[in-house]
Amino acid sequence: MKVYKAHILYTKEKSSFEVLENGYVAVGTDGRVTGVSSDLASLDCVDVEVTDFGDRLLIPAMNDLHVHAPQYRNQGIAMDLELLPWLQNYTFPEEMKYADTGYAKRMYRRFVRDLWRFGTMRACVFATIHTESSRLLMHLFQEAGLGAFVGKVGMNRNCPEGLSERVEDMVDGYESLIKEFKNPSPLNSNLSPLVLPIITPRFIPSCTPEMLRACGGLAAKFQLPVQSHLSENKDEIVWVQELEPESTCYGDAYDRYGLFGQTPTVMAHCVWTDGEELELIKRRGVVVAHCPTSNFNVASGMAPIRRFLDEGLRIGLGSDISGGHDLSIFRMMVYAIQVSKMHYQQNHECPFLSLSEAFWLATKSAGSFFGRVGSFEPGYEFDALVINDSDLNHDHYSLLERLERYIYLGDDRQIEHRFCRGKAIPEPLIN
Ligand SMILES: [Zn+2]
């Protein structure tokens, strides 16, 4: 067992922070929190050495529910296009390069290192159609000790030939990844693997009905999670309706193939989700990955997150590199609050997000997609960041003000230690 002492802040509920000045958190050998308290004696771990982080802040680590690893080179470029021309002109040509595992290694190493830098310990990641580059990315996450659901991407229509894969090859590729990565950890059989394949049809326009059916089949057969894109852009929604004329909404087009909550499912964007689609998301327990910067950059719109929260939907935040330009989930909290304020300008019955709500989205709410992750309540996996904000704390701010200033003003330089599932995670090597 290990015990850490610091100023502890986390969100049990979305409406408020738990704040423990000079608090203690105890972590068992399986990496799970066994207790959190201001009173060491109450934690029942008398002879355990305490690691004292002094005046630093100890908070749950970040979770990124939607990010494209092979678009990392394109981060911060091509920010003047809408979704469909952006895909054709920038994204697809870049993804084709991942047929070369040497190129993939060079880019993916940097991507994994930078997720680490910004304190993201778990992520739902799109790779490309290429099985060997996807395998390499999964190995890099394993070597780093970070948690990731990694999706080899299914696509076989409306894309360049170099990014189209036959359905049989997609299935074979997935099965070889599943065989390698899906076994429970032999040391801790009560813990699921940190790195796991996630079934990833790119989006309806990229996949024939056969491809979608095969993806749904893999998810059901191997009980694997699913990720994709949903109702991001109005032209895209019209296109999906043309391609799947029987479907009653975009979400229903996935549902018909067993790709909408039949196994744990996360859908990115949901900017234009309403009516029947919203009801279906709720009924199926589909998780929404809100990607506010991407929605601005690719001129998609503003997702109605307050409404989703009030409807009881499960929501997390996504950086969506490279539609989004910023890998920091802390910054994503800021953008999510700002988007909700723009909504508020249009509809005053829709209050904007509070800081605790944004923090909860990035930690406990998003973390639930990976298991018991994102809080310091007993039983949660200890995914944590130690923040040394001494350069931002120049005039005796309260602990909550210090956290807010870190979220708005801080970056990777203030993160001193990172933990994933109880283990301290050193900087991954990039060479
Ligand atoms: Zn995306």
Image (spheres, grey):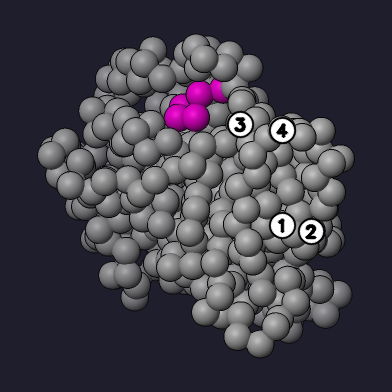
Q: Is residue 195 magenta?
A: yes
**Amino acid type, residue under disc 4 in the picture:** Asp
**Quick check: 179 left or right of 368?**
left
Provide the residue designation for mark 1: 8
Q: Nearer the viewer, mark 4 or mark 2?
A: 4
**Amino acid type, residue under disc 3 in the picture:** Gly
In the figure, residue 85 lies in which quadrant?
bottom left
| Sequence-wise first label, 4 or 1 | 1
| Sequence-wise first label, 2 or 3 | 2
**Quick check: 67 left or right of 47?**
left
| Sequence-wise first label, 1 or 3 | 1
Vertical comparison of 324 with 68: above or below: below
Residue depicted at 30% across the width and 20% down the height: 173
Give coordinates of residue 316: x percent, y percent.
63, 51
Query: Magenta segment range?
Result: 192-196
Provide the residue designation for mark 3: 31
Task: Residue 20: give its label.
Answer: 2
Q: Is residue 277 magenta?
A: no
**Quick check: 234 left or right of 81?**
right
